[in-house]
């Protein structure tokens, strides 16, 4: 997917469709949770299926935070030599317990990065999605 920037604009606000396209073509990001007055950001791998994010986890701080507050933010990005992008979503995370929901999550194809058991499935229903595309380069000189 090519992005057309105005000649003097290194930052391009992406459409919702462009943001979903980028989010769908990577498998790693960061999940932000908030509970008991603390914000935490953790790296996760994920899959997008029908505009829903699925991830797997194990018992720990991330899961405890999701049990307290299901409002989350999620961010994924990509950086190349001359361009970069970032997509941020806000939504609700649901720890899946029903067999049909878990089977749907399993069919997404998400799998852990590391050889540990991660049998808790989480579905993030997206309420907002925002993306930016960046043309990389040196900072221009200031006029004095």
Image: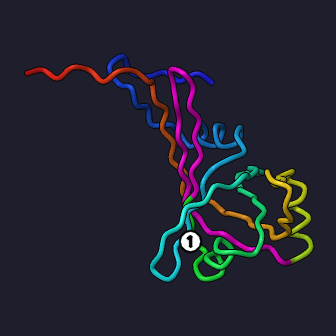
Side of 1 where 57 appears, left or right: right
**Which SS class for mark 1?**
strand
Q: Position of residue 102 (x, y in %)?
A: 87, 68
Disc 1 packing (10 Å; few <14; some 14–19; many ≥20): some
On-image quarter of the C terminus: top left
Closer to us: 20 or 61: 61
Residue at the image position 52 percent from the left and 31 percent from the top: 84
Front position in the image: 58 or 88: 58
Q: Is residue 122 above or below residue 84?
A: below
The spot of residue 33 in percent (x, y) is 56, 69
The percent position of residue 5, horizontal first and vertical second, equals 43, 22
Asked if residue 12 is among those painted magenta in the image, a careful observer would answer no
For the point 87% across and 62% down, the residue is: 104
Looking at the image, the residue that sits furthest to the front is 115
Residue 28 position (above or below residue 8): below
With 50 as the anchor, is 132 left or right in this view? left
Farthest-out residue, top:
7
Give the quarter of the image for residue 65: bottom right
Residue 83 lies, in percent from the top left, at 51, 25
Q: So how many labels did they put on this image?
A: 1
Look at mark 1 in the image and give the residue it sits on: 71
Q: Which residues are magenta?
A: 74-97
């Amino acid at each position: 997917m090519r992005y057309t920037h105005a000649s003097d604009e290194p930052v391009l606000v992406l459409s919702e469709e462009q943001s979903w396209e980028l989010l769908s073509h990577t498998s790693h990001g960061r999940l932000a949770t908030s509970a008991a007055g603390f914000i935490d950001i953790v790296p996760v791998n994920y899959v997008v299926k029908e505009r829903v994010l699925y991830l797997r986890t194990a018992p720990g701080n991330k899961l405890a935070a999701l049990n307290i507050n299901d409002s989350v933010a999620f961010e994924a990005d990509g950086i190349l030599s001359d361009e970069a992008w970032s997509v941020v979503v806000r939504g609700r995370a649901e720890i899946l317990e029903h067999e049909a929901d878990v089977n749907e999550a399993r069919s997404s194809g998400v799998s852990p990065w590391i050889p540990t058991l991660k049998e808790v499935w989480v579905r993030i229903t997206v309420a907002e999605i925002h993306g930016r595309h960046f043309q990389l380069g040196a900072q221009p000189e200031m006029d004095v």
